[in-house]
Amino acid sequence: MQFLDLPPVLEASGTVRLPGSKSISNRVLLLAALAEGETDIRDLLASDDVERMLDALRALGVDWRHAPGTNNYRVRGAGGPFPVKVAALFLGNAGTAFRPLTAALALSGGSYQLSGVARMHERPIGDLVDALRQIGADIDYLGNDGFPPLQLRPATIRRGGVVKVRGDVSSQFLTALLMALPLTGEEVAIEVVGELISRPYIAITLDLMARFGVRVTHENWGRFIVPGGARYVSPGTLFVEGDASSASYFLAAGAIGGGPVRVEGVGSSSIQGDVRFAEALEQIGARISMGDNWIEASAPASGRLRAFDLDLNHIPDAAMTLAVAALFADGPCRLRNIASWRVKETDRIAAMAIELRKVGADVEEGADYIRVTPPATLQPAAIDTYDDHRMAMCFSLVSLGGCRVRINDPKCVNKTFPDYFAALSGVVTPVPVVAIDGPSASGKGTVGARVAEALGWHHLDSGTLYRLTALSAIRRGVDLGDAAALSALAAALPARFDGGRVLLGDEDVSDEIREEACSVGASRVAVLPAVRDALFGRQRDFRQGPGLVAEGRDMGSTIFPDAQVKVFLTASAEARAERRYKQLIEKGLPAKLESLMQDLRERDARDAARSVAPLQQQPDAVLLDTTSMDVDAAVAFVLDLVRDRGLATG
Ligand SMILES: Nc1ncnc2c1ncn2[C@@H]1O[C@H](COP(=O)(O)OP(=O)(O)O)[C@@H](O)[C@H]1O
Ligand SMILES: Nc1ccn([C@@H]2O[C@H](COP(=O)(O)OP(=O)(O)O)[C@@H](O)[C@H]2O)c(=O)n1
């Protein structure tokens, strides 16, 4: 399984240009395909769901062209039903393609097979099929009743009259009918049965249909009239707004991570309901400002979002972002009236509950609500994403809690936002790391500790973890080649660091781990991949604000490959042996220069030759050879690097 590790973040601020709206992109493509004339569509979303729609339109005989290097498309409309009368369409997991195409194809007088991925075949479509059957459409279920895949056949469609459709499972059924019914040419009334959910999505549909010349009226969102003699006519050029649901992650980032974070592409003139996410964020304390085409969010003056209890029926997709924002609130939060989450890309209520618990939240889920009690401190976790782009994007926000987070299967964001993680990294400042790697006695520990102190940052001497593992093993008589036993020891190591002291349980072992036996032992256990794995997360957990200085052999290559400063610290073997000798004698520990030299050479060789995380200078590391340099100069050199990168002032 692929994964993406997001580092803990210090703060969020900056500007993001949003990709095109998925809802608008797929609606506009279908309307342009059915319309008379050519439509120039600007800033179309480039994503999997839109690809599925584009592929389908081409298979149905609609001619479209893409202007290379842009997100602009020209669609030559069919001026009515689709010209190709027999087709098999694969629509992935794109609800915004599947539902509207089902309705439009049911009225196109052809034989069409529509299928998708396994999850698409678990997402209900029965209410739409029932509505279409009322007017004579010939539709069969090829799998389970009420679900895709579907077989559509030519049929005599009753024109005019009344069609009833349920509105309480997915508003896409109504959207699909609204967009397709003008193909009949007669006035039709659509009556919504049950309470209409996600109304703002219907507003988008009506707005876009009007731009293509078909004006639908409605009575209080319960009864809609598609006028007689309606035909779609291209509006010429049409700009796709930025995606308001995608905006939610960045606005939340601003509200949690300080801000201001500005999104461009949506604003007060947007037709997308999800811009109202900004209002919800404001209600819970965030500072929001807005222009026609942008929205900006900053953290509350108090620094902390307020606990909330909100009905989020009108913004079901963006509401997911609030479920994760709840981790940063000052008390338990309740998200209500979100039953539609259960039939989306995955059962989002269940998925959200499982993953929020992983980071430490206490979660209660009901049929149509979720209650999130934030933990005192977030726990690092590996988040499963359920092939659901929004799960991946939402949980990236955990990193704003100064907590590392792993996102499994990060490519699921391709559904709506292929560049999401790059866009996110453009507005967040990860906790900075100075990684110092190098051979034994090159001065890593001394320089690292001094640099950390000068910056006021945390310090990790990773070698002590290997030394402690060796010490525990020696004490318990564990064989230094027994990978399974050693990795179990390493994983459960009761290590604590207190000032300059190293504790194993309550015992101060600072000196003991420096003795020859531990040095040799550490070097031996360190070649075992299982031991290195067992210590991996523990080392990463040292990365906390305001920053970390980490030293060892693989800080820059493996543990913190994204470290902002990487130093390869070295000195000649003779210089290093002499330093070690002096160091041990000063501590009153036994030492012989010759055997130290010998040991050092052997350890250097083992570190450089091992298969996992060998010691070598990284291409992006700065070489610092201290053979003829004193400690002060070495410390000053590293501090200069840190300041040059703009990571610390003073
Ligand atoms: N640039 C330097 N010049 C002289 N002595 C140094 C220098 N850097 C470190 N030392 C000394 O060398 C000894 C070993 O350094 P240490 O920091 O323990 O190395 P490492 O952590 O790389 O094994 C210490 O006594 C330290 O004071
Ligand atoms: N990041 C690290 C740190 C130490 N080690 C191993 O752990 C041993 C002890 O590390 P250390 O940094 O305390 O050793 P010295 O450099 O002080 O001799 C080294 O000999 C390395 O083999 C490692 O493999 N990876």
Image (spheres, rainbow, N blue to C red):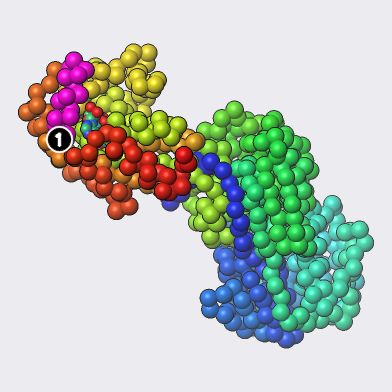
Q: What secondary structure do most residues of the magenta stretch adopt? A: helix
Q: Does 563 sit above or below residue 477? A: below
Q: In this figure, what is the number of numbered marks?
A: 1
Q: Is residue 175 left or right of residue 582?
A: right
Residue toward you, 291 or 333: 291
> Residue shown at 76%/80% (left/top)?
235
Residue toward you, 172 or 332: 332
Which x, y percent locates residue 419? 53, 60
Q: Which residues are magenta?
A: 575-589
Q: Does 387 sit above or below residue 630? A: below
Tell me if residue 578 is in the magenta stretch.
Answer: yes
Residue toward you, 364 or 330: 330
Determine the quadrant in which ligand 2 lies.
Answer: top left
Instruction: Choose top left, top right, bottom left or bottom right for residue 287.
Output: top right
> Mark 1: is the Cβ under 8 angstroms from ligand 1?
yes
Q: Does 387 sit above or below residue 395? A: below
> Residue shown at 71%/43% (left/top)?
286
> Residue shown at 87%/70% (left/top)?
216
Residue toward you, 314 or 465: 465
Which x, y percent locates residue 175? 77, 65
Res 462 visible: no
Res 295 visible: yes
* Residue position for label 1: 575
Q: Is residue 411 left or right of residue 580?
A: right
Which x, y percent locates residue 329? 67, 35
Which x, y percent locates residue 380? 49, 36
Q: Is residue 519 left or right of residue 458?
A: left
